[in-house]
Image (cartoon, rainbow, N blue to C red):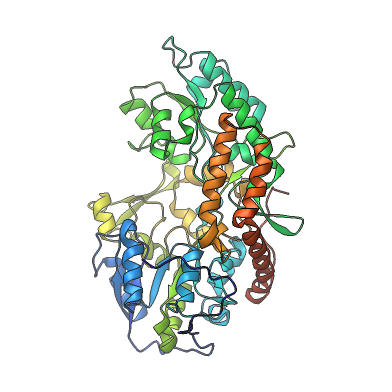
Amino acid sequence: MIAVLEVTHRPASRRGPPAIPVNATDDESRRLTLGWMGPPYHPSATEGTWVERMMEERFNVDLKPVFLGYGQASEVKALMYSGGDLPDISWEGDPTTIQQFAHQGFLAEIPYELLLKYAPSYVQLVNRYAPAAWLVSYWNGGNYGIPNLWLDGQHPAPGLWRMDWLRKVGISKVPETLEEMHFALKKFVEEDPDGNGQRDTYGTSSIMWFWCSFNEVYGAFGVAPSTWLERGGKAVWSGTLPGAKEALSLLRQWYAEGLIHPDFVTDDMSMLYQKFLNGKIGYLGTGGFNDLDTSNPNSVICKLRLLCNKPDAELALGHFPKGPRGECGSWCWGGVGNIWVFGRQVADHPEKAVRILKMLEAVTTNETLFVESKIGRRGIHWEYIDPAVGKEAGIRYLPPYDQPQVARREVLPSTPDLAGGAFFNLSNCGDPAIYNQYRPRGLVESLDTYQNPKYGIKDILGKSDAVPSAGVYLKNLRDYQQAVFAQIIRGDVGLDTFDAFVKGWYERGGARLTKEANELMQARNRIYSRMGVKAEPGSTQP
């Protein structure tokens, strides 16, 4: 494995990350061979899929794909890179990895001018929906990748209520404020909503993961504890803000009242869902339109009614509860996805970079190509149910591609929502005006209504680990924060422990990260100017 490096303010490694020439050109009549390592979600795929052949014919290239599984990707990739086996283009997950690989000389620098020249429409999409994406590929004054969009990440996850429980305890509508939420959760504990004659239910629970822990409660106080937010023109760690302490005070009260299941400290996501399915809690803090899909046997509503023998169960998506100052919202990933990078050898073959950027531009602007590069061809791999039939409209895979194992083997997503793609697109990496036409109408309406981006609290740096020393400090600081927050909620320590936590957070590396976060904000302004970003998309947060 490649060791984590502290790379802040260091010059490039002695091998030097080479730069692709700004004046690079490409002769499209010349067939190019491109080594291509996509996202690690198609380990069973092999070379020669329909999508690959279509892309090869369309762009006069010979693709040499490398397919890895998620569990093996990091180790295999590290060994390949160390041995000099660098694909021409690779998918990378996080800024920390980009910084390590760039420092070690494995990547080629991609001048912004090349992106503007050969992929202008894609640049405009990034500028419009997630300009902070330019920061996740930035290191040491240069750009080392093509940031992906993940536009579904703009939508924060709403809560999921047992609507039949609400009615059972005399509540006719989904709670809209923290006070109403508290009232409902308390009734779930005290008034036997499952009707078994025992006091064995809780209001809610959560898990202590940095990106999924009582998000809507923190959002009601204007914070998302594991993100960088902007306050007074400065980058600050949200978990150290007064709003985090206010949220902890409320959660501490709820826990003392028995509203929160005590296993929230040790549960993982599957255990949390199981508590909801088993009727131990009546509110789940993460949900979505697909959970209410009665046509999908794997949806939460179908599992409740069929597998858990609760035929009368009803679900409703939640509103983000308003806090004492009228704030509401929840943490979200934002529109920033991952990063495509070029191997260092591409600097010596710049025509490959140009060809790849032309491919990206074509996929961005051509609707047919965009769709086929992700889910194959209509009539062969899928068919479309017209929106006139109702909210179940959208893509339906044709046999045998309706079988997940077959779909994955053919580098098609296992769900028909344009959320895949082994070549370029991991998720909804394109214009919503295109891909929303192919999605279930109910999903689009739900995203607009219950998961509107205006409720999302996103990181101002795109990702919290975009700061150079994140690989050294961030994981330990996250773990430290989660441990202290759990102790405060459970009442193991006093609420005033929060103040000591803030001091300790800065002493354990947070001061270094904060300094770098503000330096990156200054670099952000320069990058935005170069890339033509006019304004950061708005937010409901102050």
Q: Position of residue 248 (x, y in %)?
A: 63, 35
Quadrant containing the N terminus in the rendered view = bottom left
Q: Nearer the viewer, residue 490 or 195?
A: 490
**Side (left or right) of 518 relative to 77:** right
Q: Residue at x 65, y 36 (%)?
A: 247
Q: Residue at x 60, y 77 (%)?
A: 141
Q: Position of residue 421 (x, y in %)?
A: 38, 62
Q: Position of residue 33 (x, y in %)?
A: 32, 82
Q: Is residue 27 above or below residue 472?
A: below
Hey, which residue is sitting farthest top in the picture?
Answer: 197
Any part of residue 459 in sight: yes
Q: Nearer the viewer, residue 227 or 158?
A: 227
Q: Is residue 433 above or below residue 424?
A: above
Q: Residue at x 49, y 73 (%)?
A: 145
Q: Nearer the viewer, residue 415 or 499?
A: 499
**Side (left or right) of 125 relative to 106:** right
Q: Position of residue 350 (x, y in %)?
A: 44, 87
Q: Nearer the viewer, residue 248 or 124?
A: 248
Q: Residue at x 48, y 33 (%)?
A: 264
Give the quarter of the image for residue 195. top left
